Amino acid sequence: MIGFTSADLLGLLPALLLVLAGMAVLLLEVFQRASFPRTHLAYVTALAALAAAGVSYLIAPAEPQTLWGGMVRFDALGCVITAFTAVACAITALGSTRYLEELEIDRGEYYALLLFATAGMSVMVSANDFVVLFLGLEMAAVAMYALTAYQRRSNLSSEAGFKYFLLGALGSALLVYGVAFLTGLTGSTGYDEIGAALRAPDAARHFANPTGVVPFLPLPLVGMALIFVAFLIKMAAAPFHMWAPDAYSGAPTPTTGFLSGAGKIAGVAALFRLFAGPFATPDLSGGLAGWTTLAFFAAVASIVVGNLVALTQKRVRRMLAWSSVAHAGYLLLALCALGVKEAAAGSIRAVILYGAAYAIANAGAFIVLAAFGRDKAEADTLDELSGLGRKHPAMGLALSLFLISAAGLPPAAGFVAKLSLFSTAFAAGEGAATPAYCAEMLQWLAVGGLVLSVAGGLAYLRVIAHLYGRDAHVRVDYRPHPATTLGVAIAAVLTLWMGLMPGRVLVWGGNVAKQLLPAEVQAAPAEVAPAAPTEAPKAIEVVPLPTAELPL
Amino acid sequence: MNTVATGLLAPLLLLPLAGAVLNGAVGRFLPKSLSAAIGILSIGAAFVVALLATLQLHGLPGAEAYGAAALTQDLAEWINVGPLVASWALHFDAVTAIMSLVITGVGLLIHLYSAGYMHDDEGLAKYFAYLNLFVAAMLSLVLADNLVLLFLGWEGVGLVSWLLIGFWYKDAEKVDAANKAFIANRVGDLALMLGVFLLFGLAGTVHIGGLRDWASHMSPEQLTAAGTLLTASTLLLFIGCTGKSAQIPLYVWLPDAMAGPTPVSALIHAATMVTAGIYLMVRLNFLFILTPFTLSVVAVIGLLTALMAGAIGLVQNDIKKVLAYSTISQLGFMFLAAGVAAPAAAMFHLVTHAFFKALLFLGSGSVIHALSGEQDIRRMGGLGQVLPSTSKTFLIGCLAIAGFPLTAGFFSKDEILWGVLNNQQVLGSPGLSAVLFPLALFAAFLTALYMFRLYFTVFAGEQRLTDEAKSHLHESPAIMTGPLWVLAILSLVAGFAGLPHFTGLHNHFHHFIAPVIAPTEALVRSVYGPESGAIWGCVGAGTAAGLSGMGLAFVLWGRGGETPARLAAAWPRLHALVLNKFYIDELYALTFGKALQVKSRVYDLFVDNLVIDTVAVGGAGWLSTFSGQLIGRLQNGNLQRYITIAFIGLAFVLFLIARGGVTP
Amino acid sequence: MVDYGALFVLFLFGIALAGTIVAMATLFGKKLPNRYKKQVYEAGSEPLGDARIRINVKFYMVAISFVMFDLETVFLMPWAIVAKEFGGAGLAAAMFFVGVLVVGLIYEWRKGGLEWE
């Protein structure tokens, strides 16, 4: 590769914007008196992040393009995920002002790190080459380690950052290890080349066991599995979730919302790109590595562990941390469905909506929690939140909305998201090409996940009950910072919008699916069915499906 | 299917919502009278719109044909995920018309009454905002043309109910009552959601019209194939109904829900929200008719609830609790009707019950208002002269609910009894029906008995007031008695809308909703032919049950000022007989009733912990405390362990690959 | 393998040269040992003992700055060799890279990272 074109730059424009803004924030920070409050930096950050989101929306290409000599894929997936992570970044930045002042860590680096992390996520989801993927992943991860440990004087925060770093490093190591297998076998780090090599007709013979060292382990599968596990660690999916509760409850509160929400959806988006691309068979039948099974086990473990433990938690942040494990499980549920041709497009639509809803509502929930810390302590136990809804109706209502969204109840975004997710998983179980063992377990997983999500919902509802119950413990004189109010408002409006009018986001998801999936899957007859979303569906004329064929 | 697009439905839904938003946003800056006016006017306007829509519906051609004539309005797309299509689309047919008129009509009266009742409350604007929001949610429930939108309304009314039960949130007990109601409802909602999902899996649509087509075009083979799952889905739907409509086993929240303001009890916990379950049964009657087993369950649960709640109502001493149990009991009657494939009767009773139960609640509110908050009927008595309007209207309400001839309750209850007698073979096991009818009669008898016990204890005899209550004793203002009289008149005459067929007169009510319940009607008719002469016996028996209940109540409590002690002394044998006959009653008094009186732990332990936590939450609560803590114990903060577990996970993944389990 | 022959010779030559110098110094050099000179690391680090000693964080600052600018050289060197072929685009990319580092340097300087005390 020699040189680059303006198209190359355009494709990475959002990430560039974020990086430049981050550098600008750093410079602004060092040329200001230490005593000067950094609130304006929050606005700068939010503005830059929203601009990046807007740019991603505007430049989203109609056809996927490969840029930077094949290293970067510029398509709807990257744009949509960048847009939503950037919005989450803006919300987090706006919600951090008062919190940082209270804890006396009000420095500009915080905002710069937020921007760098977002840029890293953007690069990560746009990667079309393992080197770029690793670059983006580490860019995001290193910034997030620093953010987690940002409250330097707090032992808890340092411990959180350290644990996050060690497990994150383990994840990175596994990723590189896995990539090493694939690159060693195929001679390339590019997604396209690796995919082509893995799918070559003689691949099975070629890759089955070239060394004979480990006779029972097919090496390409080992490489893919290591990469998959690396992402599971980064996403905090069970059983690789152990670091998450500690890290999430030790990190500065607003950051936690960003890490657990935006970080997770960027990870799952990168996984989707991998498993719909290089790691997929042309018709996605169970995937080349049968990763549906792996995703299935991880999803089950995450949903069960996350929801059940969340119920027993007494502290709200820890409860949210645990339930973020469950959310990772739901996202993986969509990944299971991706392996079924009939449900592939649906799973992508669902994961986009679910990810967007989760990232936004989660960021919102944590900044409300952050806003109600008092006197250097977090508002964390249920008692400390008691009466919030009564004393501060707007904030209480917003927090309730975010929790309702997380619980998957109408009218918040989480409801439609969960609905589309579960119906996709259910549909995946009915796919004609679905292997029999997948079919039943997917449907059971869908039903079981639904039941567990209700159990998990109780954990959220308990918080809401406290918000509106009993006597107020929240300090009376509190007035939220205008920036926080703005951030909460953005999150709330988006959560409601996606809940009541999810059509637009689903259309984006449809675009992503169209650009991401191989042409063979596009042509699958099952995917022709959904009506063009712009038409108002004449629901009265719904043609009932023949029941006899349903393997219920 | 004859559907006509109309523009009337969106205003119907949005008017109350606008009122709620207005009062919620700026209500606290407005003078109280203005907030009240906003609330009342928005509901009044909605009532007018509902009337207009009903008239338009009535004028539609083809209402006679199979398939309901209906008005529809599509607002926006909502969910469009593969086969799952649910829009913001409204559907207005006969059943919706009746529900909308009841919701907005009774709602209007109760809004008016509330303006007087809540006049001194600081949160008046908030109160009206909630009340309007409730009406909007309830309307969206009945106007929904698909089950997802219906579920939204279903959740919405639950939310507002929670807000209003806990309206006086500074009282921890009321907050607990609100939370209890919410949790019990959530349990039902889970079942409803699963039911809807299962139905979607079977029929491939959540659109009610689509479901109806699906159900009506199913061949016998298809029906056999879908049978078990269809039964499961209707059962799940019914469990959802038991939550919202306070039936066994999820009825427990309704008595506690009386912690809310009395007009709220009248509107939400008597006239409208709790009837959502009945509405759902009628709306989906084409599904329930396909599953005889579910119908039997519905009928049995309904009747058991009616009997049990009636029995408990007999021993309660809190005026609102008596009415609450009465509501549960009457809802049981409606489910009985729905269970014996008489949806018209269920719907008719729903309407008349809305009138007289709202009347009774508002009357009790008037009494409580007059006595400065006293709710214990043992400290009432002899209020007849002091509260002339209240006592007269209350008497009318009691007569109506007891089924005194030619009152509204007389017609609706007789129609249910007739349904039990006539449609009994619809039930899964015909032997069951032989038991149902006499028990239903007994429940009707109980109704009259406990209602007149209440009436006589409160309004007849000598005054047993506390001095404090005595000093403020006054009849309520006209804005409160006005709605009482309107409802009283409705309780007297509403029955004539549904004159039974055997009188030879036109049954307007039945005729009006016939298209909606046509699938059920067709089946019942095809099996059993026209009504027989046995109906006169049925009417006679029903009337006798009601009258004997009244008579017994008069004998026991109505003979001027006898105290319970003197009464027991004067009629020792009869008193003992009643007590023995109601052996079940004593049992309830010991477990539930008594426990309720003292708000005891037994109740919480037994029902809350055992039923709700353990059984109803599907063991999730139990599972979580054990497995959750077990997993939590792994989470000891030790980094080495975290990494160990991660590596065990990795090893498991590699193991899966090695044994080839991942390749399909 | 022919191509690598020269490299192999260079390798051998390097070893021989270094070996010769060390051997000559050992044989002919004047030795004045004292306590400090006998230590393994003349910089003063203890080769034996508890590894968990506190090291002033300032060393890390210096080390990080060093690694940063060291890597800058590593990246710029290959570019410099092919700068002509890369042309304007290559120059722009390299300048962006340097620019980023300059911002980092400014940040470090203003934050006091370059001062020992």
Image: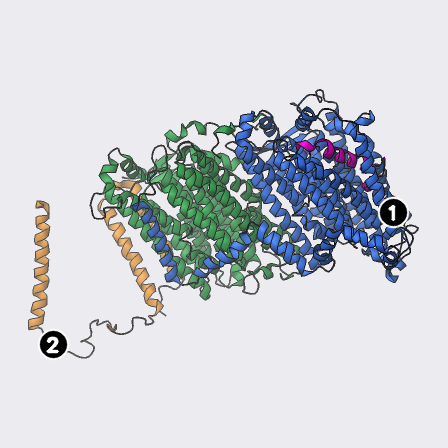
Chain colours: A green, B blue, C orange
Q: Residue furthest right?
A: B385
Q: Which residues are magenta?
A: B399-428
Q: Residue at x 79, y 39 (%)?
A: B355
**Mark 2 nearby-residue class (10 Å; few <14, some 14–19, many ≥20):** few
Marks 1 and 2, how far apart at CA: 119 Å
Quick check: can you spot residue B69? no
* Labels 1 and 2 touching (C-beta < 8 A): no
Q: Nearer the viewer, residue A431 or B332?
A: B332
Judge whether residue A72 can be spotted in this image: yes
Chain under numbered label 2: C
Residue A533 position within the rendered picture, expressed as x and y whole percent measured from the top left: 52, 30
Q: Position of residue B231 (x, y in %)?
A: 58, 36
Give the residue type at disc 2. Answer: Lys
Above-or-below relation of B48 to B356: above
Secondary structure under the numbered disc 2 in the rendered image: loop
Which residue is under mark 1?
A: B390
In this rendering, the answer to whether B229 lies above or below A400 is above
Amino acid at dot 1:
Thr
Quadrant location, the N terminus of chain A: top left
Give the class, few, some or many, for how many residues have Cα within 10 Å of label 1's Cα (few <14, many ≥20): many
Q: Left or right: where does residue B81 sit relative to residue B443?
A: left
Residue mark closest to the camera, 1 vs 2: 1
Which chain letter goes with mark 1?
A: B
The residue beneath circle 2 is C31
Q: Is residue B400 magenta?
A: yes
* In front of the other: A232 or B655: B655
Q: Is residue A133 above or below residue C101?
A: above
Secondary structure mostly seen in the magenta stretch: helix
